[in-house]
Image: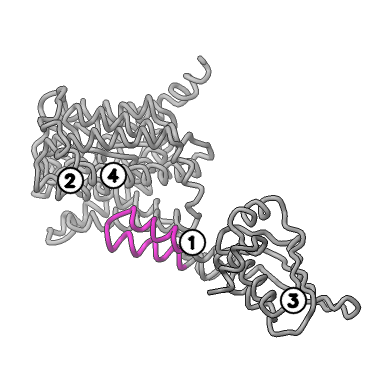
């Protein structure tokens, strides 16, 4: 117990605290920006980011992962806020939390195994593009000072780690933010700062029960939004967990993460915050800045609140160019550059799945749509590929006047047509044996194909015997097949 607490919390104290500061600084403008996207006051996003990060540090399934208010979730809230207001958003946030906890108990985290590697790569690449695109408004119609500051910030981020000793101790994104803020204040530059994004809250969040009528009408209003928020939130969280697992070479408990996200969102809704989920960008900043344990997530949330309440006079001075530099670093670090090289080496189907995932996410700004498109395409390509691995060979024994068909491979909806086409129903033979000892029947389409083959042969006057059904195939054929049920066969042949 004690060693587990030490490993999860106190095995990397300095790295976690420093990473927490960097993440908190990066969270502030993001939380404000996402609040503006959703159409709510900046404090709604800031309170949400504080609450979700603190709660998830204790109940989440992945140490070192950052959860807070996110753009993907904010995009889903726009219509609800516009039509019904903030109170309904808070109610939807609470319902989202409940649905995510239910998903955790139903072990829906295990569904991630159906998401192929190419979908994850496409998702990551799309997110990197979206993170970069989100910085473009800060780089358009601005003075040359902004470009100079951004370029200087990127130079600090990438060159500072090369300095012996100190470059390894201090995270370069933090140095970038501190140096550029000091420079902007010293030179009194007239450039956009965090203070221009919106007003920072000046009080601690307080307990708020959403002021909505508790009736069926309210449920009908918030349920569609809550379902969408649940799906997108869990998808992004599961994807982020997969990426952080890879970066840190560790494993995470996905079902615990589902429940943790739910508890965090309930906490957020009760403190006047919006729904959130894991953030790939911030999680990568955390890992790259040296954060590894739950302490980094907790410190990010606490530092965020302390900075907003205590250091607000300094925070509002941070030039947006410094944070743009940090987010450009995140997008460069997030993008899977190897995937471009792999376009030549990987199969065409894998490349198509990856590219379609990227295009759909970028076009719709909805991560769920992209992942759904990728998973569906991957499933279709897989079904088509497996369907090719089915072979039917024929052999004729003149002594017994028996034609034996040997079926090898998988028979299911994708290969059922090829299965039927492999038989010669017009051949005049007395006996037909269909040997399926090296085949497997997966679904009712496969069973229907077997029925069709047997019935067609019988219609031509041949005696048909099906041999070698394995136990699993026999179970489904016995249940749904009609070729060995006289009444059913007669009805089938009558059609």
Residue under the image location 66 percent in, 55 percent down? 473
- The numbered mark at residue 33 is 2
Contact check, label 4 and label 2, Cβ < 8 Å:
no
Question: Does the residue at mark 3 contact the one at mark 4 (Cβ under 8 Å)?
Answer: no
What's the distance in space between the residues labelled 2 and 3, CA to CA? 74 Å
- Say which of marks 1 and 3 sits in front: 3
Q: Disc 2 on helix, strand or loop?
A: helix
- Provide the residue designation for mark 3: 462
Q: Residue at x 9, y 48 (%)?
A: 82
Q: Does residue 62 appear anywhere in the picture?
A: no
Within-10-Å neighbours for mark 3: few <14, some 14–19, many 20+: many
Identify the mark nearer the N-term, 3 or 4.
4
Q: Residue furthest right?
A: 399
Q: Where's residue 382, x and y in %?
A: 54, 63
- In front: mark 2 or mark 1? 1
- Which label's residue is closer to the chain start, 1 or 3? 1
For marks 4 and 1, give the one nearer the viewer: 4
Give 220 or 237, whichever is nearer the viewer: 220
Cα separation, mark 3 vs mark 4, equals 56 Å
Residue 227 has which mark? 4
Q: Residues within 10 Å of mark 1 (few under 14, many from 20)?
A: many
Q: Residues within 10 Å of mark 4 (few under 14, many from 20)?
A: some
């Amino acid at each position: 117990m004690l060693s587990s607490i030490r490993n999860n919390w106190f095995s990397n104290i300095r790295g976690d605290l420093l990473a927490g500061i960097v993440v908190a600084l990066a969270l502030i403008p993001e939380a404000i920006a996402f609040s503006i996207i959703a159409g709510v006051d900046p404090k709604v996003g800031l309170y949400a980011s504080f609450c979700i990060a603190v709660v998830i540090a204790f109940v989440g399934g992945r140490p070192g992962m950052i959860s807070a208010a996110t753009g993907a979730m904010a995009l889903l809230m726009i219509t609800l806020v516009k039509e019904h207001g903030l109170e309904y958003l808070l109610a939807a946030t609470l319902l989202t939390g409940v649905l995510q906890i239910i998903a955790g108990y139903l072990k829906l985290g295990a569904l991630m195994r159906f998401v192929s590697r190419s979908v994850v790569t496409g998702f990551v690449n799309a997110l990197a593009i979206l993170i970069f695109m989100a910085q473009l408004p800060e780089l358009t119609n601005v003075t040359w000072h902004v470009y100079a500051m951004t370029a200087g910030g990127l130079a600090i981020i990438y060159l500072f780690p090369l300095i012996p000793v100190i470059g390894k101790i201090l995270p370069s994104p933090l140095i970038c933010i501190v140096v550029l803020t000091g420079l902007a204040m010293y030179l009194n530059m007239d450039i956009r700062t965090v203070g221009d994004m919106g007003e920072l809250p000046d009080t601690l969040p307080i307990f708020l029960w959403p002021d909505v009528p508790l009736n069926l009408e309210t449920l009908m209003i918030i349920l569609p939004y809550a379902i969408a928020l649940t799906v997108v939130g869990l998808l992004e969280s599961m994807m982020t967990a997969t990426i952080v697992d890879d970066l840190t070479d560790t494993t995470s408990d996905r079902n615990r993460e589902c429940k943790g996200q739910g508890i965090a969102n309930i906490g957020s809704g009760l403190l006047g915050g919006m729904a959130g989920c894991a953030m790939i960008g911030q999680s990568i900043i955390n890992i790259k800045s040296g954060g590894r344990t739950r302490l980094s997530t907790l410190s990010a949330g606490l530092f965020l609140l302390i900075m907003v309440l205590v250091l607000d006079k300094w925070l509002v001075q941070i030039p947006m160019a410094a944070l743009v530099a940090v987010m450009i670093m995140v997008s460069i670090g997030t993008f899977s550059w190897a995937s471009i090289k792999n376009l030549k080496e990987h199969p065409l189907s894998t490349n198509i799945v990856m590219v379609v995932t990227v295009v759909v996410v970028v076009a719709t700004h909805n991560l769920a749509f992209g992942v759904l498109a990728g998973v569906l395409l991957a499933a279709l390509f897989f079904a088509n590929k497996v369907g090719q691995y089915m072979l039917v060979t024929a052999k004729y024994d003149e002594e017994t006047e028996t034609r034996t068909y040997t079926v090898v491979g998988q028979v299911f909806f994708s290969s059922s047509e090829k299965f039927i086409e492999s038989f010669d129903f017009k051949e005049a033979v007395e006996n037909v044996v269909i040997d399926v000892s090296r085949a497997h029947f997966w679904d009712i389409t496969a069973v229907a194909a077997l029925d069709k083959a047997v019935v067609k042969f019988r219609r031509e006057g041949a005696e048909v015997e099906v041999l070698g059904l394995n136990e699993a195939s026999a179970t489904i054929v016995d249940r749904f097949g009609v070729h060995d049920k006289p009444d059913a066969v007669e009805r089938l042949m009558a059609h």
